Amino acid sequence: QTACNFIKSNVDSSSIDSLFYAAQSIRVLSGCEVAISNETRELLLGAVSEDSSVTQIFHAVGALSGFGLPLASQEALSALTARLSKEESVLATIQALETASYLSQQADLSGIVEEIEDLVARLDDLGGVYLQFEEGIETTALFIAAAYKLSDHVGTEPAIKEDQIIQLMNAIFSKKNFETLSEAFSVACAAGSLSQNRYHLPVIIVPDGPAAVSHHQPVLRLQVTDVMSQPLTQASVKLDYAKSASTKATVLQQTAFALSGDVFELNFMNVKPASGYYDFSISVDGDKRFIANKVELKVKVSTEVGITSVDLSTVDKDQSIAPKTTRVAYPAKAKGSFTADSHQNFALSFQLIDVNSGAELIPHQTFVRLHNQKTGQEVVFVAEPDSKNVYKFELDTSERKTEFDSASGTYTLYLIIGDATLENPILWNVADVVIKFPEEDAPSTVQSKNLFVPKPEIQHLFREPEKRPPTVVSNTFTALILSPLLLLLILWIKIGANISNFSFAPSTIVFHMGHAAMLGLMYVYWTQLNMFQTLKYLAILGGVTFLAGNRMLAQKAVKR
Amino acid sequence: AAGSVGSVVRRFLVEYGSGTPSRLKVLDAYLLYVLLTGALQFGYCLGVGTFPFNSFLSGFISAIGSFILGVCLRIQINTQNKGEFQGISPERAFADFLFANTILHLVVIKFVG
C-alpha cells in the first residue's frame, strides 16, 4: 500500500517513461488504481507513431496496456515496424519484442517474432562457453526475458537452440556481484523467464555435498532444480550408465534415482564397486520442455585399507644363514630391533587389501620412512609391488649409504600409506632398525643440512688487465725507435740534401706553415679530438695548404 | 760463390753511388728509415707481446703505408720513367704523395688509440 501511495503521488503525467513505470508497477500491486486523465491518454496515444523513438513507443504501449486503456494494435504494430527499420540497435530490437508482447494477437506479429532469430545471430560466441551481446550481460538478459515473453504471448517456440541457451545462461549467470541495480534486475527477469515459460526449461543438476560415496555414506544425492533453484520433484532422474574411470567397464546402468524430500538419491554401494573414480551419465526427464538435462559427473568411491602379511626379516648377504622373519600385525610395533649392516640386509614385505571387499589395493603412496633418532635425519623410500601385488622393500647398507650420509645408528621405521580414495591413511611405526655403515665412511660430524643459512659470498673477479712489459723495456724501445730517424738525418746530410733552394715566396711560407699545422692537428687529434672535429679542421687547413702548395709547385715547375 | 755475391754487391753500390741522382738518394734514405722503423716495431711486438694490438697495427701500417707511398713517389719522379708518366709532373707526384700520406695518417692516428 505504501508503494501504491508513493507511485500515485510521484507519477509524472507528462512523461511517458514515468507513466510506463507506474503502469507496470500497479499491474503487479493488487488493488492499486491510478486515475488517468484524458490528456494523459491522448499523450500516450499520440506517442505511438513512427515519429517517436522505439523506447517511446514501447513505454507508451506498455503504459496503455498497464492502465487497461484501449489501443489500436495494428496501427501500433505498423508504427513499431516502421520505426524499427530506422533504429537498428540491439536494445531497440529487444524493446520492440517487449512492445509486441503487449499487442493483441489479432495483429500479425510474425515480423517482430522473426527479429528474435536475427538477434540470436548477432550474439558473440566467446570460446564456445559464453554467448552474449557485445553490449554486455544486461542487454543479453533483457533479450532472454523479452524473447520468452513474446514467444509465450504469440504461441511460437523461440528460435534459440539448446546449446545456445546453455551458453546464454553461462554468460548471464557468470557474475556473483552486480554493479548496477538495472543489471541485477535484468538477470533476475531472465532467470524468471527461464524457469516459467512454455517452451524451454533448463535443468540444473548438482550433487548435494561432495560427489563421493563410501561404506559409511553409500548414497549419492543430487539436487535437481530449475534456474530459480526450485526442486523439480515431478521429474524422473535416471542413471544412464556408471563406468569406471580407469577400466571403462560399466558397473551400473539404467537405474532410477529415488526422490527423498527435495533431493534425488541412489545407493551406489549396492553394486559393490571397487574403490576409485567413476564417470556417471545422468538424464532428467518428465517434461518436454526440459533442456540441458543430461550431465556427466565424476564420482569418487572411497574405502578403507588394511595391511596384512607384514613380514620383517634380516637376510644374510652370503645366503648362508636362512632369513629370520618376524610377523607384525598392524598397529602393533615389532618387539626387538633388526640390524642391517655389511653382512645382512633388512627386508620388509606386506600386502594391502580393501577392508570391505578383500580385493588387493595399489594406493598412490606407499612409503617407508626411516628416521634417525639421534640426528633427526630421515630418509624416505618407495615400496613397490611385485607381480602378485605383494609390496617389498629391501635395505642394503652398501647400496644406500649416500642417502643416509653413512650415519650409523638406530632408525625408527614408519610405513606411510595414502591415496585420494582411502578414508584411513596410515602412518605406522613398525619397528626399530639398527643400521651400521662401514666405519671409514662415517662422517666426522653429522650436520643437519640447514638450507637457509647465508651461502659463502662470491667474490667478483674483475677483468684482469693484460700483461704488459715492464716500463724499462718499453722505454728502451721508444728510444730505440728514434734511432732510424737519427740515421736518416745523418744520411741526408751525407747525401747533401739542403734547403738552399728555399724561396721566401708567400705561397711557399703559407704552404709550409699549413703543412706544419696539419701535422700539429694530427697530434691534437691523437690527444683530444674526435674524427669529425679533425675532419673539420683538416678541411680548412688542407684547403689552404693545397692552394698554397699548388701555387708553390707551379712556380717550381715553371722555374724548372 | 761467396766471392761473386760480394763482388755483385760492391759493384751495385758503386753504380748506385754514381748513377743515381741525389734527389732519389734522399728519397731512398727516407725509405730506409721507414723500413727500419717498421722492422723494429715488428721485432718489438714479437718479443714483448701484442698488447695493445691496435697500437701495434696502426704503427706498423703507418710504416708499411708510408713505404709504399714513398716507393710510388720514387717511381714517378725517376726521370728514367718519364715515358710512362706523361701527364704527371714531379710536382704533381709530390702533391699526390703529401695528400695520400695525410689520409693514411688520419686513419693511423684514429687507430693508435
Image (spheres, coloured by chain):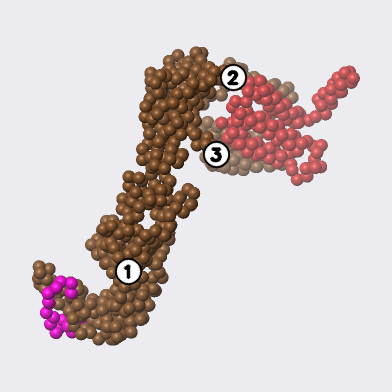
Which residue is denoted by mark 1 in the rendering? A144
**Image coords of residue A494 (percent x, y):** 73, 22
Crowd class of label 3 (few under 14; some 14 to 19; many from 20; radius 10 Å): few
Magenta stretch in the rendered image: A27-44
Point out the tag, 3 or 2, that comes first from the N-terminus: 2
Give coordinates of residue A545: x percent, y percent.
Answer: 60, 39
Observer-nearest of B28 and A409: A409
The residue indicated by pointer 3 is: A531
Report if residue A33 lies within the magenta region.
Answer: yes
The chain holding disc 2 is A
Tell me residue B61's x, y (percent): 66, 32
Which chain can be seen in red?
B
Question: Disc 3 is attached to a residue of which chain?
Answer: A
Q: Secondary structure at mark 1?
A: helix
* Distance between mark 2 and mark 1 Cα atoms: 90 Å
Q: Residues within 10 Å of mark 2 (few under 14, many from 20)?
A: few
Q: Is residue A267 magenta?
A: no
On the image, the x and y values in percent for residue A27 come to 18, 74
